[in-house]
């Protein structure tokens, strides 16, 4: 069994996490009394994320912003490193281009500015409008397509299709005749939107290629910092057997962050040496 992130959540924090998601798994949206409060990253992973500028030094790993609710089935898929949450590809592409520019801003500051842009505030970032619809959304990446092919995630609340229209900065409900694989079309799964009167609509989420529905875009709206998700994705890179575009982009970003950290460290050592 792969090592899973260990949390030091207090009872009050666990209660806060459960209340936030109403005991509902954030990925399959299933309600369960035995839902688990799971930390996305542990202390060692948090330290590495801070070192690379993905999270700020003040981030607390035992806070509710590092926790989600998972059902037992989804929990196993994550802890066995079959799947991992990721930032959407458009956001990863934007970050890759940005960090390769002359800017030395740490990634956690870029994440904060993107949230400001999503809220309509002016920000000092190059053309963030193209990715604003994806801020606050996360995708699901299959790390091991071969063994994951036998698994299918079942959700009792398969969402309708959403679409980004021209010059729009939000996903909106798509027309009834919209193709599920059309450009700018996706299903948005959001545990916080499920109410007692929400009608059941059982659906499947295939975890590996070979099924037509796998080609559909799906995003999860989860109220956790993008830096936490990216830090967890960094951990998943070492288990990847898919070589998908999400992973390629994430690896490129991490490699550049590591290179930049080494360069900055050498600069500090050089200044110290000459003092």
Image (tube, rainbow, N blue to C red):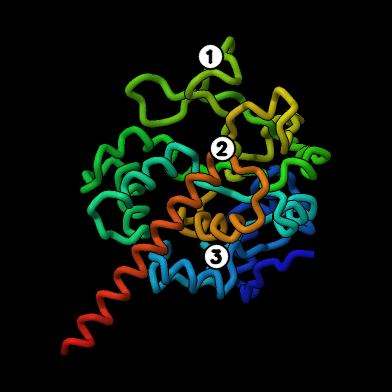
Q: Which mark is residue 64?
A: 3
What residue is rendered at 63% in x and 50% in y?
A: 84
On the rendered structure, is 161 left or right of 183? right
On the rendered structure, is 265 left or right of 253? left
Which of marks 3 and 2 precedes in the sequence? 3
Task: Indicate the quadrant where residue 43 lies.
Answer: bottom right
Q: CA distance from mark 1 to mark 3?
A: 37 Å
Please rate how many residues cluster around mark 3, counting C-alpha atoms within 10 Å: few if below 14, some from 14 to 19, many from 20. Answer: many
Of the 4 image quadrants, the one containing the N terminus is: bottom right
From the viewer's side, name the closer residue of 6 and 191: 6
Asked which secondary structure carries label 2, the reply is strand
Q: CA distance from mark 2 to mark 3?
A: 21 Å
Please rate how many residues cluster around mark 2, counting C-alpha atoms within 10 Å: few if below 14, some from 14 to 19, many from 20. Answer: many
Image vertical order of residue 195 relative to residue 199, above or below: below
Image vertical order of residue 130 relative to residue 72, above or below: above
From the viewer's side, name the closer residue of 249 and 108: 249
For residue 190, say whether it is visible.
no
What residue is rendered at 16% in x and 89% in y?
A: 275
Asked which secondary structure carries label 3, the reply is helix
Disc 1 target residue: 175
On the rendered structure, is 146 left or right of 186? right
Residue 9 on image: x %, y % = 62, 73
Residue 134 on image: x %, y % = 44, 38
Asked which secondary structure carries label 1, the reply is loop
Image vertical order of residue 18 relative to residue 91, above or below: below
Which residue is situated farthest in the top direction here? 177
Residue 40 on image: x %, y % = 60, 61
Image vertical order of residue 46 relative to residue 215, above or below: below
For residue 103, say whether it is visible.
yes
What residue is rendered at 28% in x and 82% in y?
A: 269
Task: Indicate the quadrant where residue 187 lies.
Answer: top right
């Amino acid at each position: 069994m792969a090592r899973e992130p260990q949390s030091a959540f207090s009872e009050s924090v666990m209660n806060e996490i459960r209340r936030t998601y109403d005991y509902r798994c954030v990925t399959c949206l299933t309600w369960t009394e035995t839902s688990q409060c799971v930390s996305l990253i542990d202390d060692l992973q948090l330290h590495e994320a801070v070192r690379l500028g993905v999270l700020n030094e003040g981030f607390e790993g035992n806070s509710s912003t590092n926790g989600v609710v998972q059902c037992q089935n989804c929990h196993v898929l994550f802890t066995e490193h079959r799947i991992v949450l990721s930032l959407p590809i458009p956001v990863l592409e934007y970050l890759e281009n940005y960090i390769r520019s002359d800017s030395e801003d740490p990634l956690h500051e870029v994440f904060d500015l993107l949230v400001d842009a999503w809220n309509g505030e002016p920000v000092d970032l190059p053309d963030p409008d193209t990715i604003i619809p994806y801020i606050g959304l996360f995708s699901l990446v299959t790390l091991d397509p071969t063994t994951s092919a036998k698994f299918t995630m079942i959700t009792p609340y398969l969402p309708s299709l959403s679409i980004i229209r021209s010059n729009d900065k939000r996903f909106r409900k798509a027309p009834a005749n919209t193709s599920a694989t059309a450009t700018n079309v996706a299903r948005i799964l959001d545990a916080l939107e499920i109410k007692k009167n929400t009608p059941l609509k059982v659906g499947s989420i295939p975890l590996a290629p070979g099924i037509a529905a796998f080609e559909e875009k799906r995003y999860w709206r989860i109220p956790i910092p993008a830096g936490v998700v990216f830090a967890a994705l960094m951990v998943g890179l070492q288990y990847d057997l898919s070589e998908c575009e999400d992973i390629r982009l994430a690896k490129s970003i991490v490699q550049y962050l590591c290179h930049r950290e080494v360069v900055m460290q050498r600069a500090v050592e050089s200044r110290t040496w000459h003092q």
